[in-house]
Image (cartoon, helix red, strand yellow):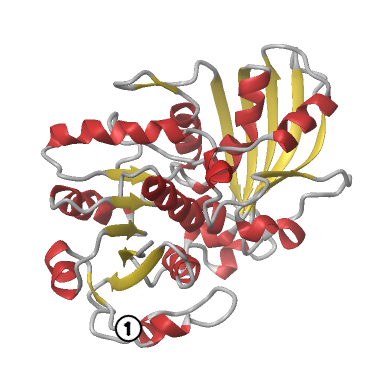
Amino acid sequence: MDKVRAALLGATGIVGQRFAKLLSDNPRIELTVLAASPRSAGKRYRDAVHWCIEGDVPEELAEMRVIRVGLEDVKREDDVELIFSALPSEVARDVEPEFAKAGIPVISDASAFRMEKDVPILIGEVNPDHLKLVEKQARRGWRSFIVTSPNCTSNALILALKPLKDEFGIRRVIVSTMQALSGAGWTGVPSMAITDNVIPYIKDEEEKVEREALKVLGEFDGSKIIPADFKISASCHRVNVLEGHLEAVFVDLNSGADPEEVVEAMRRFRGKPQELKLPTAPENPIIVRNEPDRPQPRLDRYAGNGMAVVVGRVRRDPVLENGIKFLVLSHNTIRGAAGNAVLNAELAIAEGYI
């Protein structure tokens, strides 16, 4: 199978760097174009990027010249078949449709189109059938489509909730998050603000979690997504951890379940990416730890090469009627961002959309 030729928009940011690292040795996708802001355009990637994740700039990408973000710039550079977008949302809103109109599919990590009725928010293990929704985007006059990934915090929560929804049903969810600094970008949180501190507010984060999870966990009826019929209450906080979002989750189930049954449902859970043996898919999307002090970001964020979520402290909740509570951890820039998007692309390729 020939590799799909791809361009990466927003290649120099933290999520862009994750994309570059993940795609540097992907067996189904070849990264042939790197694009970023005008201040980076024309430079070699190694000179344009302030590399701030583990390891070095991938050797095969280091000497590539970065170009400006934009349809004509990318088309002049290479005949790409796929776009990965790690752009800021306000830029993505204008740029991503240009490629979809031109017939080049966009797999986006940006939030710009997540809540559009004809754009899926995709997690391969959770809602692969929502990929069919892209066929509705032709009404926009687009020759191709945009597929989005959820917010990094929503991603871990949704993965943990999916087997519970399927097996027991969900009445309501309360989640309190402890989110890593990398989620705000290299310059997102000043060191003087976060040192010896917790910041109890992340702009728009709670609203994203509460909306996106219901869309992803909703049902596709062939023409539209019907959101899941339970409510979510989120409280989001920034903590002094480099990578790895930790979330305390409280779930009121429709039917009673023992913690042991919940653990078994999570451990048994697999999805379409595992069935298809997609390259980026973890063998176990959900790993459950038995130790009383796990998961921890420093110890567990790279589980499944950063693509598995790790659950621990599964126990009864004494307040909710059919209450279960647990902790869930994910690597926010891998599973929660670039890795999920790469997995979405692999799924779209396997299903014949790309």
Q: Quadrant of the N terminus?
A: bottom left
Q: Is residue 200 visible?
A: no
Expressed as whole percent of the image width and height from the top left, the position of residue 266 reads 71, 34
- In this view, the residue farthest toward the front is 1
Q: Is residue 278 left or right of residue 116?
A: right
The quadrant in which residue 43 appears is: bottom left
Label 1 secondary element: loop
Q: Which residue is mark 1?
A: 64
In the rendered image, the vertical position of residue 181 relative to residue 321, given as above or below: below
Expressed as whole percent of the image width and height from the top left, the position of residue 90 reads 27, 52
Q: Is residue 28 visible?
A: yes
Expressed as whole percent of the image width and height from the top left, the position of residue 169 reads 63, 17
Name which residue lies at 37% across and 50% down: 349
Name which residue lies at 43% across and 28% down: 215
The quadrant in which residue 34 appears is: bottom left
Q: Nearer the viewer, residue 35 or 188?
A: 35
Q: Nearer the viewer, residue 252 or 179?
A: 252
Total marks in image: 1
Name which residue lies at 26% across and 71% down: 37
Q: Is residue 217 left or right of residue 143?
A: right
In the rendered image, the vertical position of residue 352 relative to residue 264, given as above or below: below
In the rendered image, the vertical position of residue 153 relative to residue 78, given as above or below: above
Q: Nearer the viewer, residue 99 or 68?
A: 99
The quadrant in which residue 45 appears is: bottom left
Q: Is residue 56 left or right of residue 346?
A: right
Q: Amino acid at mark 1?
A: Met
Q: Sort mark 1 into few (<14), some (14-19) or many (20+) by Cα contacts within 10 Å.
A: some
Expressed as whole percent of the image width and height from the top left, the position of residue 232 reads 56, 25
